[in-house]
Image (cartoon, rainbow, N blue to C red):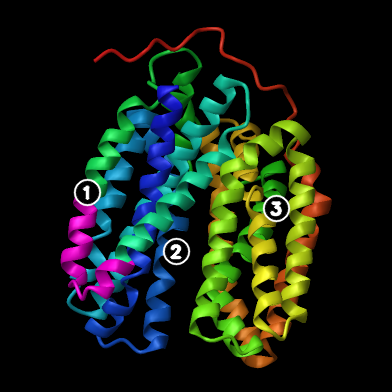
Amino acid sequence: MSHHRSIAGVFAVHGAVAGSLATRLPWIQDHLHLDPRTLGLALLCPPIGAVVGMPLAGRLAHRVGGRTATRLLLGLWCAGLALPALTPAPVWLFAAFLVYGAAAGTCDVTMNAQAVVLERRVGRSIMSGLHGMWGVGSLVGGAAGALAAQAGIDARLHLAGAALVLLGAGIAAGRDLLPDEAGEAAETGRRIGEGAGRRFALPSGVLVVIGLVGFCATFAEGASANWAAVYLTEVTGAGPGPAAAGYTIFMFCLAGARLVGDRVVRRVGPVAAVRAGGVLTVVGGAVVVASRTPLPGVAGFAAMGLGVAVIVPLVIAAAGNAGTTPGAGIAGVATITYMSGLVAPAVTGWIAGGVSYPAAFAVITAVVVPVTFLAPVLRRDRPVRRPAVAVPARRE
């Protein structure tokens, strides 16, 4: 289906932007002569920008339509990729990261709202695969950035060029998003922003519990992604290669499991899938905590990547269906999950520095435990159905 391919392309482009910037942070740090503390403060700005911007995403979709809002925000996100490398001083880097994060968060809301409406239309789970495409895009962007860094290419040239390429890819991917004017797809426009268009889309009721599940999963995902290599180096004595492999394997397991996760969800349902994922994440975390040699540590991080993979996509899908509109539900829950991504790396570092790395990952593992008990909140209250009015094919 062209609509499915289109939104998958949007997710991949969104991920590629994130992956591209991540590989050039060392260049930015060296270029601006930032000490680790200053860089750490700067890296707090993207999630802060996202948290501030997310509640406004529904308002934009309400005004211009979900399809148009997604295309505009994806374009802004791609263009924002060039900003951090172009800043002449740390204070400007902070501002650039705030803009970058706001574009990321608002686009995240509208593209996930598009995905929720399409999932309803096709009558089967597709959200995990779309988030898997985000992971694929992130890996591709990261690989290209690593090659550029290895070749000594100035990050200003690399990121500006990547921004242009990804902007073109984003425009192409967004051409066949669900139109706002037909059938149930109208939810991607007027109804995505309805209600949220008049106020901040903060969560309430069942959305808070759904957001708590997302918070727990995102906490484990963010902490593992940021600290896997350091943990393996400091605790298991891994060299640079095995330590880097731990992070890479974690990310490959995360992306790969999301690409096939929809098949699991269709077979066992979202509640069982989330429970199984929570148990696997806890087991993986326990293995990490107990590991004192590299191989079991890497295996533990692999299990955590596999376990946590489907939880966040299912949280987003549940939020879109539980809210008064897809955009309102997603904006509220995504605000909670981004807050988790904001605090997880810092809390992990604080506990690791004050106690030990195993203690930090013991806490991370404990945070995931409630997921297995809260999973029923993701149960679909009503069956997914196809719209009564078909969406006409797009004419060139």
> Residue 48, which numbered label?
2
Quadrant location, the C terminus: top left
Q: Are marks 3 and 1 in contact (CB under 8 Å)?
A: no
Query: 361 or 152, which is in the foreground?
Result: 152
Foreground mark, 2 or 3, reads 3
Per the rendered image, the range of residues in magenta is 146-164
Above or below, 268 against 180 in this view is below
Residue 246 placed where, x, y %?
Answer: 57, 72
Q: Which residue is mark 3?
A: 213
Q: Residue at x 58, y 55 (%)?
A: 254
Q: Is residue 163 magenta?
A: yes
Amino acid type of the residue that numbered disc 1 sits on in the rendered structure: Val
Q: Is 211 on the left-hand or right-hand side of 133? A: right
> Residue 118, which numbered label?
none
Foreground mark, 3 or 1, reads 1
Query: Distance of mark 3 from mark 1, alpha carbons?
Result: 36 Å
Give neighbour class at mark 2: few <14, some 14-19, many 20+ (Cα, 10 Å).
Answer: many
Amino acid type of the residue that numbered disc 2 sits on in the rendered structure: Ile
Above or below, 284 against 53 in this view is below
Give neighbour class at mark 3: few <14, some 14-19, many 20+ (Cα, 10 Å).
Answer: many
Q: Secondary structure at mark 3?
A: helix
> In the picture, residue 381 is in which quadrant?
top right
> Residue 165, which numbered label?
1
Residue 226 placed where, x, y %?
Answer: 53, 73
Amino acid type of the residue that numbered disc 3 sits on in the rendered structure: Val
Q: Residue at x 45, y 46 (%)?
A: 108
Residue 101 shows in this picture: no
Q: Residue at x 57, y 86 (%)?
A: 233
Residue 85 placed where, x, y %?
Answer: 23, 70
